[in-house]
Amino acid sequence: MTTPQDLFLVSLDVPGDHPVEQGDLSLALAGAELIDLLGARALTLEGENIVPGPVLTTGDRMLDEAGAALVRQEPYETVEDWLWRRGEGLATAYRDVLDRAGQLSGKRHRWPRRGDKAAAADTPARRHAADRWWSREPVLASLAATLGIQGEHPSEEEPGEEAVVTVLVAVGDAVTELEAVRERRRIENVAFDNIWRAP
């Protein structure tokens, strides 16, 4: 199993006060893909720029697609640009892949909410994600925390190498930016409604 798959399943299965926004999850999944590709040595970072390495076959279709999607000509893409480009619709793509593989409940008529036991199925992927979550693996814990998913006992381990930290910081910044956009839209919609309600 990969970090993005584990993160997706944690976002469904770990109870929380608020459901995870699909846009936030998509950004975090794109970051998780970068981290796994860093671990596979399919890329390196020079500052914030993603420098692609050799095209690798990881054995995971989504990670292979991510590796193939890397910009391979200079100027190389920044981590931030990658998150916004690759992240578009990524949560839905992961849901569909996991569902087709039989790792979800098979109910595809709606987006499952976090902690929805009716949608949960005891599958190897879910068990793997749960094991990684409860062991407080630092990368998974950091990505989940960005989405507002907190464990009872926060991980005390650091996520590791500088490149991984760079990706985690970029994910946090992108999620914050997306929330600011949503908040602006809410304010604009309220103001628009008030104009129409005015006598």
Image: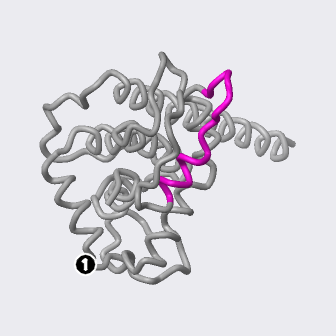
Give the magenta part as a residue range.
62-77
Q: Which residue is at the front of the view, 12 or 188? A: 12
The residue to which callout 1 is attached is 122
Residue at (35, 71) in percent of width and height: 116
Q: Is residue 95 above or below residue 103?
A: above
**Residue 57 is inside the magenta segment:** no
Q: Is residue 126 depicted above or below 70 in this figure?
A: below
Q: Residue at the location (34% across, 80% down)?
A: 118
Instruction: Using the rendered view, name the quadrant where residue 162 is placed.
Output: top left
* Residue for point 77% across, 41% down: 194
Relative to 148, is 28 on the left or the right?
right
Specify the quadrant that holds the C terminus. top right
Indicate whether residue 73 is drawn in magenta: yes
- Image quarter hosting the N terminus: bottom left
- Number of numbered discs: 1
Q: Does residue 83 appear left or right of residue 124 in this picture?
A: right
Task: In the rendered view, tell whether residue 177 sits above or below residue 7.
Answer: above
Instruction: Give x and y (percent) for residue 40.
Output: 36, 42
Residue in front for this viewpoint, 77 or 128: 77
Q: Quadrant location of residue 142?
A: top left
Q: Is residue 89 left or right of residue 10?
A: right
Residue 155 percent location from the top left of the image: 16, 37
- At which x and y percent is residue 190? 70, 41
- Give the residue type at disc 1: Asp
* Residue 191, horizontal then vertical, whole percent: 74, 37
